[in-house]
Amino acid sequence: MRDVLQKRCEEFIENQDEIKKAFRLENTYMFPICANIFCARQIPAREETLRRCNDLLKSYTSAFSNFRGTVRMAVVSLLAVSLTPEEKLRRMLDYYAELKKYFLASDYLVLVAVLLAEMPEIHPMAEIIARGHEIYRKMNREHPLLTSSEDCVFAVMMAFSARDDEHLIADMEDCYHKLKTVFHSSNDVQAVSQVLALSSDSTLEKTARVIALYNAVRAAGGKYGRYHELPVLAALASQPVDIQTAADEIMEIDAFLSIQRGYSSWTISKKTRLMHAAMLLSDDCAPGTAIEAAAMSSTVAMIAAQQAVMCSVITSTTVGAGSVH
């Protein structure tokens, strides 16, 4: 493994350990995403700073705020890497208030506000948000059964594009139909097509690169996931990386992670571990908002899906218990 990747991987594990000290009873799926926020900015996580930023978030939001839901740790981590965390939080809250004029409140909408706060203030955010809503409406028109609150993340990210809305939607649709023949999960393929729409490369080229990278990882022995893990792989494939080299390095990072505490096959799926490997390699190739958005959105989607499964199990258990009596 390259020295820079080895160092990044070691910092990734150290950051996770530090974050766990500050958030002992939180959802474990967010720890890697938060650790990567620090890695991408080459800032070490510190328990004290995290606790202080968590207290700051509590002082500005109510217990029922979506800012204190699934994405809370990500919000706190982004505040912790900021030189002016209070000012950053105010921007997040201001953008969230503007976003709620167009979108329904959700954890995903908080994620959009968080990502907007990471952008330079030179952008006219009110216009970006309004355009993002228009793109979202057009997405919904194309796929009314697939489009939901999670799609607002990349709809607003696409609003930063210099290309017109019709070109973006057509590009996204073309990517969707090309990838759907390989990856059959409609919702996840739509998420991948949104990531790819951020790239100005030809549809044929960028979809071919996603498929080639997926196949290269599989050929190297890695069973990369075909569902919520795909957007992170798409973000990496959108960068100017050599496909075979990227696949080999994903496997090298995966091998490193596999022997770390919390990353054995008993504690985390191999597919999730490979997604984290792709995320770490993406930082090295092109640290940026698109990759972070893909990783966080995938994680929030995974947690939401697991919560739905848990609710289903609880419901079926309750019904079963009631029928016994």
Image (cartoon, helix red, strand yellow):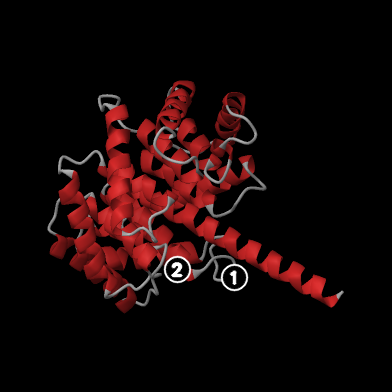
Q: CA distance from mark 2 to mark 1?
A: 13 Å
Residue 86 shows in this picture: yes
**Circle 1: is it few (<14), some (14-19), or many (20+) Cα within 10 Å?**
few
Side of 70 relative to 289 (left or right) = right
Bin the neighbour count of mark 2 within 10 Å (Cα to Cα): few under 14, some 14-19, many 20 and up.
some
Badge number at residue 271: 2
* Observer-nearest of 302 and 279: 302
Q: Of the residues tagged 2 and 1, which is closer to the observer?
A: 2
Find numbered disc 1 in the image and state the secondary structure of the residue it sits on: loop
Query: To which quarter of the image does residue 113 belong?
Result: top left
- Relative image position of residue 229 (x, y in whole percent): 40, 63
Q: Which residue does the image show at 59% across and 32% down from the upper left?
A: 54
Q: Of the residues under marks 2 and 1, which one precedes in the sequence?
A: 1
Query: Badge 1 is on which residue?
Result: 266
Amino acid type at image mark 1: Trp
Inspect the image, locate mark 2, and give the three-letter code of the amino acid beneath it.
Lys
The answer to which of 34 and 14 lies nearer the viewer is 34
Q: Position of residue 292 (x, y in %)?
A: 37, 47
What residue sits 53% from the left and 61% below the top? 305
